[in-house]
Image (tube, rainbow, N blue to C red):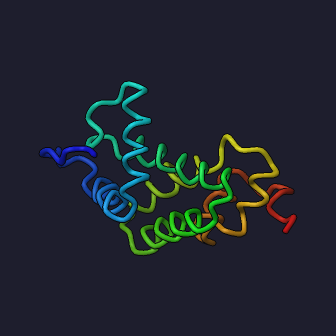
């Protein structure tokens, strides 16, 4: 668990999203922190974009493991943040989460996972990467 130290005022909206994710998904937050620390990141409270990108990997892990409840929970949560968020939060969800989701998975995993991803996140993903054949296999 990351100690909540005094944070700079930069990226406050984005940092609040990370705090809400930490509260909602403490196990995945701990795994995200560990993954980032292994790669040399220290002050995790100051890098919300990097943190959300790494959290997207936790969702991708859930897709790989066919843990559909986790995929649904993660993506619904981020979709809600996108819907109700400021422009800064919407950019965070788009650029750091949706763009990085499933980046390292094969078409078979993506095909299986796609129907379990919240529609807002799917739309952001498709806007970035374009329509793919595997999106329409189910």
Residue 136 drawn above or below residue 38: below
Q: Residue furthest top?
A: 40
Horizontal side of 13 relative to 57 (left or right) equals left
Horizontal side of 92 relative to 62 (left or right) equals left
Q: Nearer the viewer, residue 81 or 75?
A: 75
Q: Residue at x 51, y 69 (%)?
A: 79
Residue 120 drawn above or below residue 61: below
Residue 20 sits in quarter: bottom left
Whether residue 88 can be seen here: no
Residue 81 drawn above or below residue 11: below
Q: Position of residue 50 (x, y in %)?
A: 42, 40
Q: Position of residue 41 (x, y in %)?
A: 35, 30
Q: Residue at x 26, y 35 (%)?
A: 43
Residue 103 sits in quarter: top right
Number of numbered tags placed on the structure image: 0
Q: Residue furthest left?
A: 6
Q: Residue at x 52, y 53 (%)?
A: 97
Whether residue 99 can be seen here: yes
Q: Position of residue 95 (x, y in %)?
A: 51, 50
Q: Nearer the viewer, residue 1 or 20?
A: 1
Residue 21 sits in quarter: bottom left
In what quadrant of the picture does the C terminus appear?
bottom right
Q: Position of residue 33 (x, y in %)?
A: 37, 41
């Amino acid at each position: 668990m990351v100690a909540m130290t005094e944070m700079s005022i930069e990226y406050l909206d984005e940092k609040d999203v990370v705090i809400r994710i930490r509260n909602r998904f403490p196990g995945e937050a701990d795994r995200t922190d560990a993954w980032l620390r292994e790669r040399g990141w220290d002050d995790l409270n100051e890098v919300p974009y990097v943190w959300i990108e790494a959290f997207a990997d936790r969702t991708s892990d859930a897709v790989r493991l066919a843990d559909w409840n986790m995929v649904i929970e993660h993506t619904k949560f981020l979709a809600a943040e996108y819907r109700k968020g400021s422009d800064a939060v919407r950019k965070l969800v788009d650029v750091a989460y949706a763009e990085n989701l499933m980046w390292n998975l094969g078409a078979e995993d993506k095909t299986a996972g796609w129907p379990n991803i919240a529609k807002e996140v799917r739309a952001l993903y498709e806007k970035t990467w374009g329509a793919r054949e595997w999106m329409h296999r189910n």
